[in-house]
Image (cartoon, rainbow, N blue to C red):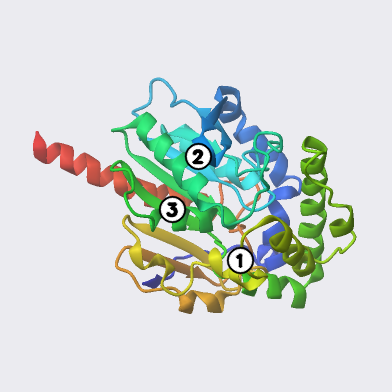
């Protein structure tokens, strides 16, 4: 189901490239940090022990006292982002103020966690993210748990929602600008404005150096880092550090197009923009139709942008809040009927 909602940023804010970069630019960066100050002050680290799958770190902000609890919101950043990325903090601040307990999860080798697990991050490490969600849900059961992810984080959470044997208290997932098919996203960065390609090369190169520094006896990326090309670097990493037969097999391994979301077991909502410079909007047509999946397509918004005013929560923040409220309304109605 593809729907549309009113999102009309001022003409000066309609540029896809401006929308994509606004969260890292002043004054929005400063405004979001200020609005998220209570969330960050309340946050405590939580190290999730995942057995043979390794360890992941989260930041937990307990629900505020004096406000009716709304359940638990688990947030996940995009590739080369982290739990303190501006778009994560913006949404987290809204959820925290509304009464949610907010868990901001870091992917492996993100948020400075290079030393937690020896094995290198890659985007097909779904089992550890799924296990982290199961542990979080079990810790808070029977309180309702809802997931919201951005870009690659949205991709991960949609795949989690299509996994078998989901926790009973996992209620809903929302994905903002999720990666649909990684090969298409890589091609878009290669063929479009190269600033995005070069940005991810720089960020990934920095992360690989940090991983090598944390595990000097296991990794030497000097030759790989000379490539300075996203596709060539990916192919080299896949060949040297995964069991995939080819880079294409790896990319297909975390695509959510085709039949991948056919097994969704909870309501899922996907927010995308037609002008996203990284995720081609045409890939929406390649998603499996499912009664639990709602796709909202907007003409503007860039990649994880959706900013209407510099000093206000984004449209994406409000979109997640409205979808999460649907679960709260259902639970409230169920409780009333029992009474």
Q: Position of residue 2 (x, y in %)?
A: 40, 73
Binning the other alpha carbons within 10 Å of mark 2 as few (below 14), some (14 to 19) or many (20 upward) gives many
The quarter of the displayed image where residue 152 is located = bottom right
Q: Position of residue 281 (x, y in %)?
A: 56, 75
Q: Earlier in the sequence, mark 3 or mark 1?
A: 3
User: From the viewer's perspective, is 27 left or right of 281?
Assistant: right
Q: Earlier in the sequence, mark 3 or mark 2?
A: 2
Q: Is residue 44 above or below residue 110?
A: above
Q: Which quarter of the rendered picture does the C terminus lie within? A: top left
Of the pair 226 and 280, the residue shown nearer to us: 226
Residues at circles 1 and 2 in contact by the CB criterion of under 8 Å: no
Residue 92 showing in the rendered view: no
Residue 123 occupies quadrant: bottom right
In this picture, residue 12 sits left or right of residue 339: right
Real-space CA distance between mark 1 and mark 2, rounded to the nearest whole angstrom: 36 Å
Tell me the tag on residue 94: 2
User: Which of label 3 and label 2 is nearer to you?
Assistant: 3
**Alpha carbon of mark 3 to alpha carbon of mark 1: how far?**
18 Å
Q: Which residue is mark 3?
A: 160
In the rendered image of this protein, does residue 168 appear above or below residue 195? above
What residue do we see at 65% from left, 53% from top?
79
Cα distance in 3D space between marks 3 and 2: 24 Å
Label 1 residue SS: helix
Residue 113 x %, y %:
68, 36
Tell me if mark 1 has few (under 14), some (14-19) or many (20+) residues whose alpha carbon lies within 10 angstroms of its own. many
Q: Secondary structure at mark 3?
A: helix
Numbered badge on residue 250: 1
User: Horizontal placement of 53 versus 295: left or right?
Assistant: right
Mark 3 or mark 1: which is in front? 1
The residue depicted at 63 percent of the width and 73 percent of the height is 248
């Amino acid at each position: 189901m593809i729907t549309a909602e009113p999102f009309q940023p001022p003409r000066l804010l309609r540029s896809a490239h401006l929308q994509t970069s606004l969260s890292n630019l002043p004054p929005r960066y400063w405004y979001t940090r200020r609005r998220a100050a209570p969330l960050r002050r309340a946050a405590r680290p939580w190290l999730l022990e995942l057995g043979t799958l390794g360890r992941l770190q989260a930041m937990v902000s307990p629900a505020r006292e004096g406000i009716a609890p709304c359940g638990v919101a688990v947030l996940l950043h995009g590739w080369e982002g982290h739990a303190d990325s501006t778009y994560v903090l913006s949404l987290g601040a809204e959820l925290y103020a509304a009464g949610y307990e907010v868990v901001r999860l870091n992917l492996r080798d993100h948020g400075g966690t290079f030393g937690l697990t020896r094995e290198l991050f890659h985007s097909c490490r779904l089992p550890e993210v799924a296990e982290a969600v199961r542990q979080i849900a079990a810790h808070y059961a029977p309180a309702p748990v809802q997931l919201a992810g951005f870009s690659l984080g949205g991709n991960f959470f949609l795949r989690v929602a299509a996994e078998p044997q989901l926790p009973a208290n996992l209620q809903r997932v929302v994905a903002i600008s999720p990666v649909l098919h990684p090969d298409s996203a890589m091609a878009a960065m290669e063929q479009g404005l190269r600033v995005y390609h070069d940005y991810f090369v720089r960020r990934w190169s920095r992360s690989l150096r940090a991983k090598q520094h944390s595990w000097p006896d296991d990794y030497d990326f000097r030759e790989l880092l000379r490539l300075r090309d996203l596709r060539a670097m990916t192919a080299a990493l896949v060949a040297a550090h995964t069991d995939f037969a080819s880079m294409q097999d790896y990319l297909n391994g975390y695509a959510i197009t085709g039949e991948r979301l056919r097994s969704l077991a909870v309501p899922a909502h996907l927010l995308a923009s037609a002008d996203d410079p990284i995720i081609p909007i045409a890939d929406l047509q390649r998603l499996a139709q499912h009664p639990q999946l709602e796709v909202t397509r907007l003409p503007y918004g860039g990649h994880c942008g959706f900013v209407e005013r510099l000093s206000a929560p984004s449209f994406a923040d409000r979109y997640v809040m409205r979808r999460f409220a649907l679960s709260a309304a259902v639970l409230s109605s169920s409780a009333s009927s029992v009474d």
